């Protein structure tokens, strides 16, 4: 009888400790602690596409060793991809492991022969996935590279859960800019509940993320397809033709026009239309709104 009571007491103690550890692992994090927890697992993606243009997106380590999650449209027409961590460690992307064009998700395989920094790729933590459906109104965070300002964190709310063109999304109110595509959308426990995908350009703080549960459909064990490939080069035309006009991808992939003459041609092609032009000079930014001049009769 004494041994039975002793065993029951030990069992209750063990269950209590386990429950305490589980509760602690699920505890809410302060924003600064959450950022510190996911920083080593977040990466900036530098892409050179088939047209020779350069732009920036975001990704994060998850699912398996050496695998990074991002939005498909970040790499869909890439011919060269590299990633950079916050400690300046760089890694080459060996290729595409798997993708879901419709859901806008891609898995990338990173080369373990990384350069610079003090943390080995294998030693970097992975962001755990939060696959349970979050509550509408819950606090969320996004880590990305808005307009190229890498490893920035912003916060907001899960505004709604919606289906757009047959695809399920989390609508979020976080301030989002080009460069945030593929970045993790995090709950207050530091779990990635989604991947940033696109925003509605004519609305304030109306952006959409792919639920992290959709990652489970991808096959992380497939061998990577190296860059460039016919698969990657041919896909953009199909994907962009099917994309609704109200979407604005969140990569820093806006076309860059060289020379004032090219700017004049752009104005001529948009004669009579209301335009917004942003002029950047170092850190200063000035916005102009005007009607593009019509050619003289």
Image: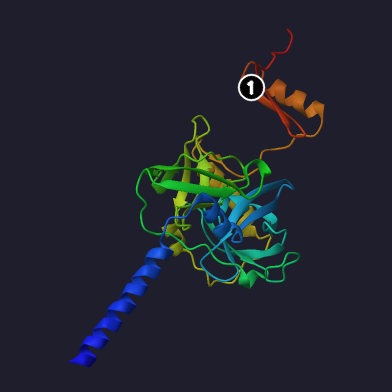
Say whether residue 252 is left or right of residue 200: right
In the image, is residue 68 above or below residue 236?
below
In the image, is residue 36 above or below residue 123?
above
Tell which of 239 and 185 is nearer to you: 185
Quarter of the picture containing the C terminus is: top right
Residue 89, visible in the rendered structure: yes
Tell which of 158 and 188 is nearer to you: 188
Tell which of 239 and 20 is nearer to you: 20
* Rendering quarter of residue 95: bottom right
What colouring does the structure picture have? rainbow
Under circle 1, the secondary element is strand
Tell which of 163 and 134 is nearer to you: 134
Q: Which residue is mark 1?
A: 275
Question: Residue 186, how many percent across, how many down?
Answer: 48, 53
In the image, is residue 11 above or below residue 206?
below
What residue do we see at 36% from left, 58% from top? 132
Say whether residue 165 is left or right of residue 154: left
What residue do we see at 53% from left, 33% from top? 201
What residue do we see at 26% from left, 87% from top? 7
Question: Residue 286, how many percent across, how many down?
Answer: 70, 25
Quarter of the picture containing the N terminus is: bottom left
Check the image and name the residue furthest to the front: 2
Question: Residue 176, how many percent across, how many down?
Answer: 55, 40
Residue 69, visible in the rendered structure: no
Question: Residue 37, how many percent across, how many down?
Answer: 55, 59
In the image, is residue 82 above or below residue 155?
below
Q: Within 10 angstroms of label 1, few (less than 14), some, or many (20 or more) residues?
A: some
Number of marks present in the image shown: 1
What residue do we see at 60% from left, 57% from top? 39
């Amino acid at each position: 009888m004494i041994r039975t009571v002793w065993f029951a007491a030990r069992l209750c103690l063990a269950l209590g400790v386990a429950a305490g550890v589980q509760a602690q692992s699920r505890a809410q994090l302060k924003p600064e602690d959450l950022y510190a927890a996911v920083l080593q697992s977040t990466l900036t993606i530098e892409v050179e596409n088939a047209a020779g243009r350069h732009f920036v997106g975001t990704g994060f380590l998850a699912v398996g060793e050496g695998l990074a999650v991002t939005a498909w449209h970040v790499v869909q027409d890439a011919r060269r991809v590299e990633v950079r961590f916050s400690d300046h460690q760089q890694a080459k992307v060996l290729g595409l492991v798997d993708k879901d064009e419709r859901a806008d998700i891609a898995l990338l395989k990173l080369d373990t022969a990384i350069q610079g920094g003090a943390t080995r790729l294998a030693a970097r933590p992975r962001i755990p996935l939060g696959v349970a459906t979050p509550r509408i109104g819950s606090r969320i965070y996004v880590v990305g590279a808005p307009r190229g300002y890498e490893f920035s964190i912003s916060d907001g709310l899960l505004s709604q859960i919606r289906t757009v063109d047959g695809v399920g999304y989390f609508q979020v109110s976080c301030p989002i800019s080009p460069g945030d595509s593929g970045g993790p959308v995090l709950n207050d426990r530091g779990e990635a509940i989604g991947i940033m995908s696109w925003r509605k350009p004519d609305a304030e703080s109306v952006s959409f993320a792919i639920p992290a549960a959709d990652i489970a459909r991808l096959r992380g064990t497939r061998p990577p397809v190296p860059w460039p490939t016919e698969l990657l080069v041919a896909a953009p035309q199909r994907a962009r033709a099917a994309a609704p006009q109200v979407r604005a991808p969140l990569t820093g992939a806006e076309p860059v026009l060289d020379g004032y003459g090219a700017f004049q041609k752009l104005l001529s092609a948009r004669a009579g239309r209301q335009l917004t032009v942003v002029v950047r000079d170092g850190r200063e930014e000035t916005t102009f709104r005007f009607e593009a001049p019509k050619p003289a009769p």
